[in-house]
Image: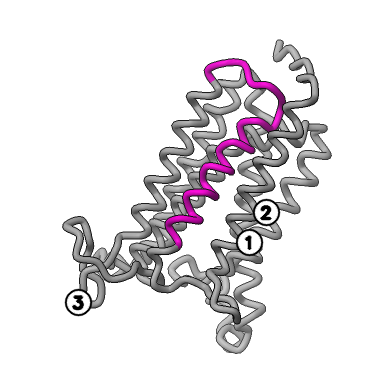
Amino acid sequence: MLPALNIGPFVFPTAGLTIIFGAYLALSLVERAARRLRQPVEPYYGLASTSLLVGIIGARLAFVVLYWSAFQENLLSIIWPLNTGYNMWGGLFFAAAAAFFYGRFRQLSPARTLDILAPGLLTGLMVMSLADLLAGPGYGTLTTLPWGINFFGVRRHPVQLYEILLGIEAIVIWFQLARRSTPHNGYLFLVVTAVYASGRLFLDTFRATAWFTTGGWHGLQIITLLIALTCLGLLAWRSQKPAPSLPDPN
């Protein structure tokens, strides 16, 4: 665990620094993805950066609203950069809304947009896992394996590192598939989403802080199973349809 870095009189939360680095990496991968698919970079990079900025602001605002009593006496703390506190679901909602309206405004193909955003989205998930590892809110189950990490004085599965490796594998698969012609728009997004969701379905077994339903089921495993099956079903359905012609980027 490394929740904060002490540099002189300042204390920087590692989760925040990780998010900043992750944002830069995600945007870089979106740019590379657009070039790999021979699409104009500017509209997709603009969509990704706008969604990212709106998502961060939205996550912060959602957190402030939920915990208003902690901010009402010191309004400056709402925008103070060294303060942590973001609501992931609020951020995802605002980011998705921004992406939807930006895409409509620029008249971007939803399926092709998802293809190009996929490496950036996977990077975001990897960053969340890394921030989780550094800040320590989540941890793995007990293990005696040699690659286990000491957490709260005991050896545990480095489940966040497993998730990061899964994300890297999915990104590698994306770039490998993008080397050749794909059957249809949305194919790359569906494939890597199915790969990542299937991996998380397995890896959640090693998370000690997993969310359980009232019936004792792993909540995340149910969600990832549904996502994986949906992606596979859409791939099977789209495989029966002829591929649309791609626009000439020139």
Crowding around mark 3 (Cα neighbors within 10 Å: few <14, some 14 to 19, many 20+) is few
The amino acid type, in three-letter code, at marker 3 is Gly
Kindly report which numbered mark, 3 or 1, lies closer to the viewer in this rendering. Answer: 3
233 is higher (above) or lower (below) than 7: above
According to the picture, the residue beneath numbered tag 3 turns out to be 153
Residue range in magenta is: 179-204
Mark 3 lies on a secondary structure that is: loop
Q: Are marks 1 and 2 in contact (CB under 8 Å)?
A: yes
Could you tell me the amino acid type at mark 2? Ala
User: x and y percent of residue 112 in the render?
Assistant: 70, 30
Please state the total of marks drawn on the protein image. 3
Q: Residue under circle 1? A: 91
User: Mark 3 or mark 2, which is nearer the start of the sequence?
Assistant: 2
Disc with the residue nearer the chain's start (3 vs 1) = 1
**Can you tell which of label 2 and label 3 is closer to the viewer?**
3
Give the main secondary structure, helix, strand or loop, of the magenta stretch.
Answer: helix
Work out whether 162 lies above or below 47: below
Indicate which disc residue 95 carries: 2
Residue at position x 65%, y 48% from top?
229
Q: Is residue 200 magenta?
A: yes
